[in-house]
Image (cartoon, helix red, strand yellow):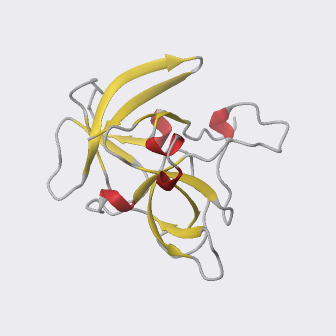
Amino acid sequence: MAEKYSVVRTDNMMGTDVGTYLDSVRFYDATNKMAAIENGNVVLVGDLLTGEREVHKATPVAANSDLKKVALVANPEVMYDERKRGLDQYINEAGKAVRVYYLHSGDEFGITAEGLDIATGHTVTPGTSIVELKAGTKLHIGASATASTTQVGKVIAVEKAGRYTYYVIRVA
């Protein structure tokens, strides 16, 4: 069976209507090499890449990154391999420019479990589960905020849509 990747929905994101909350990035991993990245992951958006007018360098976030520079990867899923049939088979290839949405207070988006780091033993509970940054590209969900981390928001719903279960997050 093919590897499963996270699936993201941009339910009510500011970038849907306001273009200044969208950007294009090329993702570089912790070793500063271009790398593939899943939709639903978060990145730290940096400066424009040399020779580019619209593509920024994106890197993994730190647990205490400034939320104003953090963006959600949500590139349109265009699959050229006819054998791939599900959104969970899509990944943004290394070296390709991808679309990201800057996080804004009041934004709502849904991510499948593959794109999240859910605390061990934690049962995600809408209204009380906290979403925060952690070092890397996956959002962390736990029962309470962790010291020295940036809180993103809360899980407001767990929704089943077709074969996917989405954890809906509202940005604080």
Q: Quadrant of residue 69?
A: bottom left
Indicate the position of residue 125 as horizontal and vertical percent values: 27, 24
For the point 33% across and 63% down, the residue is 62
Q: Is residue 70 above or below residue 113?
A: below
Q: Nearer the viewer, residue 14 or 8?
A: 14
Left or right, residue 111 beside residue 36: left
Residue 2 sits in quarter:
top right
Q: Residue at x 61, y 68 (%)?
A: 54
The quadrant of the rendering that contains the N terminus is: top right
Q: Could you tell me which quadrant the C terminus lies in?
A: top left
Residue 3, how many percent across, how many down? Answer: 64, 41
Q: Is residue 158 above or below residue 131?
A: above
Is any part of residue 67 visible from this angle?
yes
Q: Residue furthest bottom?
A: 50
Horizontal side of 131 relative to 31 (left or right) equals left
Determine the residue located farthest toward the left in the rendered image: 147
Q: Residue at x 28, y 23 (%)?
A: 126
6 or 9, nearer to the observer: 9
Question: Where does the image place residue 79, in percent across and percent down from the top left?
Answer: 77, 42
Dividing the picture into quadrants, the one containing residue 105 is top left
Rendering coords of residue 170 (x, y %): 33, 35
Task: Report the residue that reaches farthest toward the right.
Answer: 82
Q: State whether residue 28 appears in this view.
A: no
